[in-house]
Amino acid sequence: MTTKRYEHIFFDLDHTLWDFDANAQLTMKAVFEDFELDHKLACGFEDFFEKYAVHNKLLWERYQKGFITADELKWRRMWRTLLDYKIGDEELSKKMSAAFLEILPTQQGMFPHAHEILAYLSQKKYSIHLITNGFEKTQWNKIRNSKIDHFFTHVITSEASNSMKPEKEIFEYAIRKAGTTMSASIMIGDNLEADITGALNAGMDAIFVNHIKASTDIKPTHIIHDLKELENIL
């Protein structure tokens, strides 16, 4: 067991603690069925979701680079998917987006040991926070519905901080909010650019949660493949 070096732990939420992919697929299936898209588009859910996932990824990248707004991201990922089936219906896209964002945060799928490790770190008297590029209302609903909100002292979102990982400013905002220093803090996340490179460039140590066993030339402070491995570090 290592000597306690850090006082503040900053987690990413989606893909690190909260299983975004599984929860998003369940949510989109509900939207697909509620809007009877199998009849409108003459396709199965798997085909639809595969196309949606491609557009969602591309538009998130554009949003993170500042090319589109949050509102544009929310409905255009639906609109672009419908366009693949030759349906250019903006109104339907916006209704689907609203339904998706209403259902998504009610999902409670977490990665293995997520609750367990948060309880462990809390018992060890760490101050635990979130730094997330997700939307303020949606992220709060996720952590409340997943019953992990009580573990976090501060939840820093890109909307509240007017900056976004991997920008240095969001990490500096988080440090000010928590009343701590970079050297007393560590970032834990799954995204090599947003979480790991962002934190390291800001002067904060970082733990790469490599759920998918990706290869990388980036040198995080630590690499883990399962959240329970945090017990060997913190």
Image: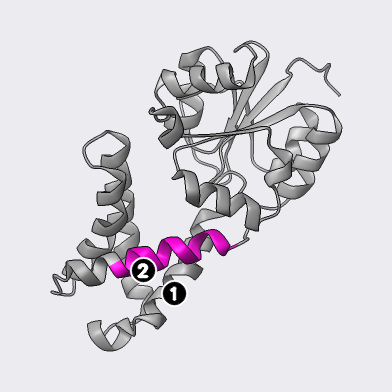
Residue 39 % position (x, y): 28, 89
Quadrant holding the C terminus: top right
First along the sequence among labels 1 and 2:
1
Q: Which mark is residue 29?
A: 1
Instruction: For the residues labelled 1 and 2, say whether their Cβ atoms are less than 8 Å apart.
Output: yes
Q: Amino acid at mark 2?
A: Phe
Q: Give the extent of the magenta segment.
A: 95-107
> Residue at (49%, 51%) from the top-left corner?
138
> Residue at (70%, 31%) from the top-left corner?
128
* 98 falls in the magenta region: yes
Q: Is residue 217 above or below residue 75?
A: above
Q: Amino acid at mark 1?
A: Lys
Q: Is residue 104 above or below residue 181?
A: below
Q: Which mark is residue 200?
A: none
> Residue at (64%, 41%) from the top-left corner?
225
Residue 81 % position (x, y): 24, 66
- The CA span between labels 1 and 2 is 8 Å
The front one of 125 and 183 is 125
Q: Is residue 35 visible?
A: yes
